[in-house]
Image: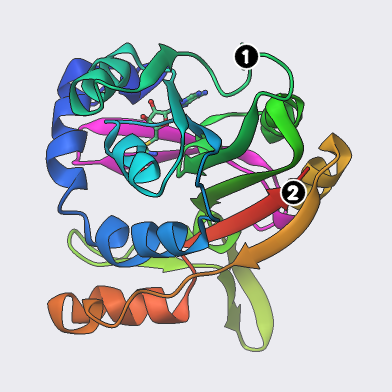
Amino acid sequence: MLKKLGSVYNSEDFIREYINSQSRDPRHLYLDKPAMHKAIPNLNGKAVLAIGCGDGIELNYLKKKGADKVVGIDSSKYMVARSKLNAPWAEIHKMSASNLDFKVESFDFVYSDLAIHYVRDIGKVFSEVYKILKKDGIFLFSTTHPIEDTLEEVKLSKHRKLKILGYRKIDGKINKVYGDYFTPRQIKNRWWKKNEVVIYYTPLPDIINEAIRAGFRIQQVLEPKPVDTMKRAYPNLYKRMSKIPFIIIFKLKK
Ligand SMILES: C[S@@+](CC[C@H](N)C(=O)[O-])C[C@H]1O[C@@H](n2cnc3c(N)ncnc32)[C@H](O)[C@@H]1O
């Protein structure tokens, strides 16, 4: 049965499945984690907040990078419980990225890996993060790449699918358009057949303009390609990830 919840992250079964698969997910292992880790600035002596910290493994990584204080937040009580198990030394709260209940200017660095596309209003996240960052503080986040979110899945047969952004021409005339780049919208993905995962697609200029509106300066934008070792382990996925971006990373400065 298809599970429809406000957020699948509020389902204990989903969290169990997610955590079991996540440590083996090649997209995390070969693309997103290496790129995010490389982009982390020097954290020695810094106060760090991780938004959407999931199972808390990333809290241990941030601590290992030299952070003095590491705080994790997640909107799922099950993820918060996992985080507390995996990083018992850290300060962890059940809290939403849209409503950060911390003292103004209390963090040097805010980190968020593949979490903010679950929030409808990205501008609210930016203004909340801006508020709790110290002057010159950094917000490093990854999100699904707008190109990935604009692709449309076309079912060719029971086992054959296409994911495309484009159009079909017949006799030189456009006959059908696939995908939608311009419309911000909710996207429903199916994970492990039975879970409906809802994310929000925000066109690239809207992400950039909302960040600027909140007061941020853009320090770096990355469209990472997978690390070389993926080529042998997952050749087809490697080819796809090397040609079409899957995630985008922003480094913003207050
Ligand atoms: C794909 S997981 C990523 C977890 C972790 N950052 C990692 O890379 O392993 C997304 C996480 O974002 C959390 N999340 C979703 N919406 C959120 C919100 N509005 N505020 C805070 N966390 C949220 C989910 O509960 C989930 O733990």
User: What residue appears at the point 59 percent right and 83 percent down from the top-left corner?
Assistant: 170
Residue 156: x and y in percent read 30, 66
Name the outermost residue toward the bottom.
Answer: 171
What is the quadrant of the N terminus in the image? top left
Query: Which stretch did the figure color magenta?
Result: 180-204
Determine which residue is flagged by label 1. 102
Q: Is residue 16 left or right of residue 63?
A: left
Residue depicted at x 32% and y 12%: 77
- The quarter holding residue 210 reads top right
Q: Earlier in the sequence, mark 1 or mark 2?
A: 1
Q: Quadrant of residue 119?
A: top right
Q: Nearer the viewer, residue 51 or 86?
A: 86
Q: Is residue 17 above or below residue 140?
A: above
49 or 206: nearer the viewer: 49
Position in image of residue 219 (x %, y %): 73, 60
The residue that disc 2 covers is 253
Would you say 114 lies left or right of 207 here?
left
